[in-house]
Amino acid sequence: MAVPAKELVSVPVPRRTSRLVLLWHSTIGKKALMAASGLVMFAYLVVHMLGNLKAFVGPESLNGWARFLHGLPELLWTARVVLLVALLTHGLAGVQLYLRARTARPTGYADYRPGASSTASRTMIWSGLLILCFVVYHVLDLTVGVANPDFREGEVFHNVLATFGQVAGVVAYLLAMVGVAFHLWHGIYSSFQSLGLSNRHLTPTVQRAAAGIAVLLTVGFSSIPLAVAFGLINPG
């Protein structure tokens, strides 16, 4: 018996779900996307720190680095878009995983003992939020200039001195670096696990490397506000 054309038209056609959507909705997929986006931001931090350390050479070195970057607008804006996507992916996945874990265990342990987990792993959501708040402030301060006490367009060295010439600017930066240290410590280690790049034999090495890298980057970034505060970096 033939099926009427009217009924054929009304039969729903199932949509194929993309692999990216399936990846996003799975816990393992979210962790993998967090790891990948985290590594993108880690690479940016390394480059950013190396650029910032030019402040120790002098104003021409730091300002010249900024002019070089702004002389490549296509590269600069591509990097900004990639970083924004990485930040949104990392942050959203992290919050969703945190809420998913809370939903799975709405009532906390009666006698909670952290065991093998580190302070860094237990505070990832909070160090992440601290870093996010700092990123917003940092952009308003040294990129947009509205939060800088004496912003001058294109004079990065002067703007850095203006920010870290105030106690509040130094304290805010150092507190953010503490958050970065804790976040990187656990983040680098867990990224290797989430991407399947670690195993039982490599785990101790990865843990030590993650801690060392976190300390190195934190010291590198923190050295600049401290140097300004103690007069080691000055307009002269």
Image: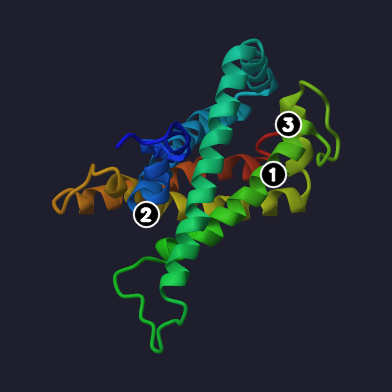
Residue 76 vs 53, above or below: the answer is above
Q: Secondary structure at mark 1?
A: helix
Residue at image point 41% right, 50% down: 25
Q: Secondary structure at mark 2?
A: helix
**Residue at the top extreme?**
71
Residue at image point 41% right, 71% down: 104
**Cα distance between the residues tagged 2 and 1:** 28 Å
Q: Does label 2 or label 3 sit earlier along the sequence?
A: 2
Callout in the foreground (1, 3): 1
Residue at image point 55% right, 35% down: 85
Q: Is residue 137 left or right of residue 16?
A: right
Q: Is residue 154 left or right of residue 44?
A: right
Residue 180 lies, in percent from the top left, at 52, 50
User: Which residue is under mark 2?
Assistant: 27
Label disc, if present, on residue 143 of the rendered structure: 3
User: Which residue is under mark 1?
Assistant: 136
Residue 64 vs 171, above or below: the answer is above
